Amino acid sequence: MTTSFSPIPHDRYGVLSQDDPTSEFDEIAEQVRRLGYAILDSGYSATELKLLSDSFNLTRANYIQTYSEARLRSAKEFHTIRAPLTQGDPAFLRLVTNQNLLDVLSKLIIGKFILNQQNGIINPPNEKYNQGAWHRDLPYQHYVSNSPLAINALFCLDDFTLENGSTFVLPATHKTANYPSGSYIKRNALQIEARSGQYILLDCMLFHSGGSNSTAKERRAVNHVYTIPYFKQQIKLPELLKTADLSPEQKELLGFNVEEPCSIDQYLAKRIN
């Protein structure tokens, strides 16, 4: 029996409106809206990626020294670096403010958005880690919205391959409130490969999981979650960055202008300003 493949049809009928992307960023945003995930190139050069890799390794070493390996392992946090942009290396602020990323985010999240969290993530070889389970990045929430409230931008420091546990996704699960059945997961789970220097973009309501790293090397990434300003940050970033030399635009992105007032006087002063 011979199998033949026909070309994708062009013709249509009964269509009254259609998406009309005019740039690569529009096309990426369209895929995130429809499927819940896409890949975005950061635009960084090989030299810049090497500097980012070195920054990650140094920050991780300092982080472990500060909080101790025993304490981090006890909290099941040894393979995570919380809020690395607050640790002093400007490389992590550059990841937050990458212009390609901000251009796509502005097409996905209506109105203003802020950085909710940034975390360094290490997928260790032949070992379980806390991202290796299906979850949403707004966990414990069972609702959907007609436009994204939060977007995950996972920056790949290393290549994400099938062998080193690249991210699994369940396409379009950001459109349905409940976690899908086991048979749906078996039929529809996809594993995404991405190169070093790319962002894996996810609607935060998309169910996804880290894979199992069967290689001999760690796989490193820096995760970012951007949300509408009504969600509180995972860690209060303005408090940790109040002495940093930041532009007004960076302060707004990092949540300086949406901190909750501690008194009526503060609220009124904020309204007047």
Image (tube, helix red, strand yellow):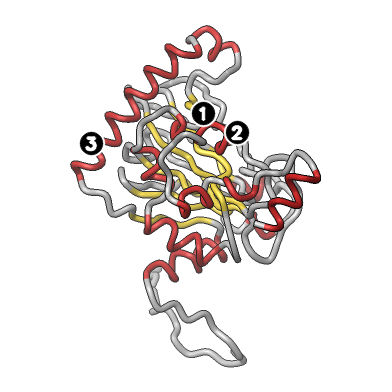
Q: Which of marks 1 and 2 is nearer the N terminus?
A: 1
User: Viewer-proximal residue, 258 or 14?
Assistant: 258
Q: Could you tell me which secondary element the residue under label 1 belongs to?
A: strand
In the rendered view, would you say 217 is above or below 201? above
Which numbered mark, 2 or 3, is in the foreground of this view?
2
Distance (Cα) linking label 1 and label 2: 8 Å
Q: Dot 1, how many residues are within 10 Å of its Cα: few (below 14), some (14-19), or many (20+)?
A: many
Pointer 3 and pointer 1: residues touching (CB < 8 Å)? Answer: no
Kindly tell me whether residue 188 is visible in this rendering: no
Residue carrying label 2: 235
Q: Do the residues labelled 1 and 2 touch (CB within 8 Å)?
A: yes
Figure quadrant of residue 245: top left
Q: Which amino acid does label 2 sit on?
A: Ile
What distance separates the C-alpha of mark 3 from that of mark 1?
A: 21 Å
Asked if residue 82 shows in the view, the reply is yes
Kindly identify which residue carries mark 1: 82
Residue in the picture at 77% in, 45% down:
265
The residue that appears at 61% across and 43% down in the rendered structure is: 137
Q: Where is mark 3, residue-wise?
A: 50
Q: How far apart are marks 2 and 3 (CA)?
A: 28 Å
* Mark sitting earlier along the chain (3/1): 3
Q: Check the image and name the residue furthest to the top.
A: 70
Determine whether, in the image, residue 244 is placed left or right of residue 255: left
* Upstream in sequence: badge 2 or badge 3: 3
